[in-house]
Image (spheres, rainbow, N blue to C red):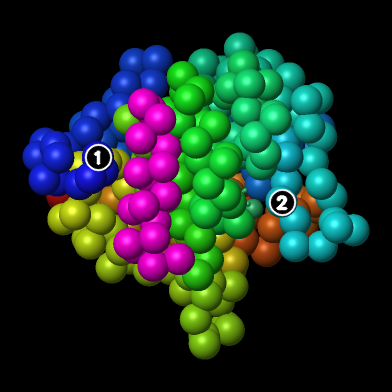
C-alpha cells in the first residue's frame, strides 16, 4: 500500500512553497474556524503570523451540523484567504466539500482540506487525488485507523502522494469533550505510515481551555504539526467560538509547543 512504511521506509517531507512539513520542524496551521469577513481574517492572519505559524486556516465552505448555521462565504471567502496570503506570506489551508468545487478551491489554496465528514467520500478523495495540491486528510469521527489509511490510498492511487493525516478526535461515550482526541493514533500512524501527521486539538476537545495542554501532548507524542482555531474575538465567532483561542492564548500556546518541540 502506498501510504505504508513497507512501500516507502523514510518519512515523507512535503514541500509547500518552501515550508517543509514532516522534516522535523513543527508546522502550525492556525486561524478562525470560518472566514467571516475580510477584517476578521486579516486580523487573524496577523496574529497567527506574528506568533510563528506558517499556515492560515479558515473555512470558506463550512460543513455544519445544522443547515441553519452559518454555511461560509464560499468563493468570496477564498478571495479573502488569497488576500491574506498576499499580505502575510502565510500558506493557505482550506476545506473543499464537494467534487465540483475542487478546481476552484485548488486555484486559491496551498493545501486542500478534507473534513472529517468527508473522509469516506470516495469520489471527493479521488478528485483531490487528481489535483496538484497537497491534501490534509482529517480523520472521520467514527473512522478506524485502518479506514483512515485506506482513505489516503484513494488519494494516492490517483497520483497525489502529498497527503497529511490530521487527527481531530473521534466519537466515544465521553461527552464532556466534543470528541475524544486520540493521540495514540499519532504513534500508530508514525509506525505504519511515512506520511506526516498533524493534530487538531481544537475540534479534538471542543473546549478552548483544553487546547493548550493537548497541543503540548501532541507535540511530545510525535506530531509533525498542529491545527489550531484562533479568533480575534471568540465570543463573537460565527462557528466554534467555544474551542477558539484568543490571540493572547495562541501566543502562549506557540511558546509552549516550541519549547516541547525543542526537546524532541
Ligand atoms: C474544520 O477544520 O474546519 C472542520 C470542520 O473540522 P472537522 O472536519 O475535523 O470537523
Ligand atoms: Mn471549526
- Residue 229: percent from the left, percent from the top? 58, 49
Q: Does residue 193 appear left or right of residue 235 in this picture?
A: left
Provide the residue designation for mark 2: 63
Against 193, residue 15 (above or below) is above
In the displayed structure, 93 sits above or below 239; it is above
Q: CA distance from mark 1 to mark 2?
A: 29 Å
Q: Residue at x 67, y 39 (%)?
A: 98
Asked if the residue at label 2 sits under 8 Å from ligand 1, the reply is yes
Majority secondary structure of the magenta segment? Answer: helix
- Whichever of labels 1 and 2 marks the residue nearer the N terminus, that label is 1
Camera-nearest residue between 210 and 179: 179
In the image, is 186 to the left or to the right of 232?
A: left
Quarter of the view holding residue 57? top right
Q: Is residue 223 visible?
A: yes
Q: In the rendered image, which quarter is residue 23 located in?
A: top left
Q: Secondary structure at mark 2?
A: loop
Res. 2 mark:
1
Amino acid at each position: 500500500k502506498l501510504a505504508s512504511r513497507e512501500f516507502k521506509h523514510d518519512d515523507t517531507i512535503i514541500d509547500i512553497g518552501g515550508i517543509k512539513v514532516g522534516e522535523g520542524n513543527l508546522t502550525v496551521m492556525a486561524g478562525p474556524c470560518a472566514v467571516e469577513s475580510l477584517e476578521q481574517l486579516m486580523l487573524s492572519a496577523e496574529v497567527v503570523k506574528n506568533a510563528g505559524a506558517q499556515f492560515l486556516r479558515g473555512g470558506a465552505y463550512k460543513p455544519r451540523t445544522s443547515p441553519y448555521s452559518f454555511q461560509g462565504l464560499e468563493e468570496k471567502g477564498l478571495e479573502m484567504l488569497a488576500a491574506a496570503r498576499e499580505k502575510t506570506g502565510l500558506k493557505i489551508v482550506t476545506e473543499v466539500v464537494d467534487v465540483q468545487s475542487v478546481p476552484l478551491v485548488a486555484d486559491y489554496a496551498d493545501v486542500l482540506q478534507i473534513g472529517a465528514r468527508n473522509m469516506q467520500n470516495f469520489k471527493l478523495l479521488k478528485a483531490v487525488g487528481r489535483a496538484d495540491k497537497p491534501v490534509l486528510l482529517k480523520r472521520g469521527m467514527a473512522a478506524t485507523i485502518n479506514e483512515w489509511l485506506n482513505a489516503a490510498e484513494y488519494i494516492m492511487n490517483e497520483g497525489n502522494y502529498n497527503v497529511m493525516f490530521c487527527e481531530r478526535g473521534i466519537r466515544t461515550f465521553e461527552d464532556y469533550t466534543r470528541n475524544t482526541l486520540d493521540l495514540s493514533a499519532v504513534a500508530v500512524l508514525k509506525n505504519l505510515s511515512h506520511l506526516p501527521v498533524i493534530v487538531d486539538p481544537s475540534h479534538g476537545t471542543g473546549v478552548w481551555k483544553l487546547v493548550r495542554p493537548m497541543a503540548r501532548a501532541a507535540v511530545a507524542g510525535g506530531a509533525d504539526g498542529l491545527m489550531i482555531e484562533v479568533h480575534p474575538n471568540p465570543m463573537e465567532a460565527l462557528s466554534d467560538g467555544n474551542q477558539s483561542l484568543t490571540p493572547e492564548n495562541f501566543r502562549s500556546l506557540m511558546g509552549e509547543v516550541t519549547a516541547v518541540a525543542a526537546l524532541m
